[in-house]
Amino acid sequence: MTPEVSAGGTCNSYLVRRVDRHLNAVYDRALAGTGIRTTQFSVLRALALEGDARISELAATLGMDRSTLSANVKPLQRDGLVEVTEASDRRARDVSITPAGRATLEAAMPAWIAVQESFEAAMGHESARALRRLLAGTLTWEG
């Protein structure tokens, strides 16, 4: 059987990327007044929850490559929301959230919670939970 080749058709990658772009746009609109974007929120939240981390470890935690993470960390560092320091072995860098970063994260939480709740309501709580489990399961799939 030949899969559809039209935009969207049965291409899993296409649909997941399209949904990703849509969700990021919705979350970015919700966070617009906070001065950070969705990806930056994720970095701050990971640091707040997990503590200081090597750039490579944080990239793995967030499912990003190091260069993508570095691009997201630079404006956070510029704005004083994270601090990046040279690690003891000089080949790595450590990143930590600053008090200003914690305050920004705290200010952004109500907007993030509101969009989370809106998504849950639109999808239904069980469907949203099932979707998260399903998507998390693909993280171990290697093709």
Image (tube, rainbow, N blue to C red):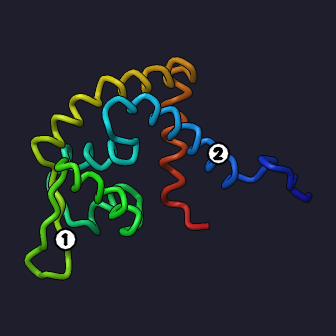
Amino acid on which disc 1 is placed: Arg
Residue situated in front as seen by the camera: 14 or 30: 30
Q: Is residue 49 left or right of residue 142?
A: left
Residue sitting at the far top: 121
Q: Residue pushed farthest right?
A: 1
Q: Quadrant of the N terminus?
A: bottom right
Quarter the C terminus occupies: bottom right
Q: Which residue is mark 1?
A: 93
Q: Residue at x 19, y 82 (%)?
A: 91
Q: Dot 1, how many residues are within 10 Å of its Cα: few (below 14), some (14-19), or many (20+)?
A: some
Q: Can you give x and y, in whole percent of width and height, for residue 63 in the image?
A: 41, 58
| Quarter where residue 83 is shown | bottom left
The residue identified by callout 2 is: 18
| Percent x, y of residue 65 | 41, 67
Q: Earlier in the sequence, mark 2 or mark 1?
A: 2
Residue that appears at 19% across and 71% down: 93
How many numbered dots are placed on residues in this image? 2
Drawn side of residue 107 relative to residue 60, left or right: left
Label 2 crowd (10 A; few <14 / some 14-19 / many >=20): few
Q: CA distance from mark 2 to mark 1?
A: 33 Å
The image quarter containing residue 20 is top right
Q: Residue at x 29, y 57 (%)?
A: 73
Q: Secondary structure at mark 2?
A: helix
Residue 121, percent across and down? 51, 17
Residue 74 vertical placement versus 112 (above, below)? below
Question: Given the current orientation, which residue lies at the most extreme front position?
Answer: 78
Q: Are marks 2 and 1 in contact (CB under 8 Å)?
A: no
Identity, as a three-letter code, of the amino acid under mark 2: Arg
Circle number at residue 4: none
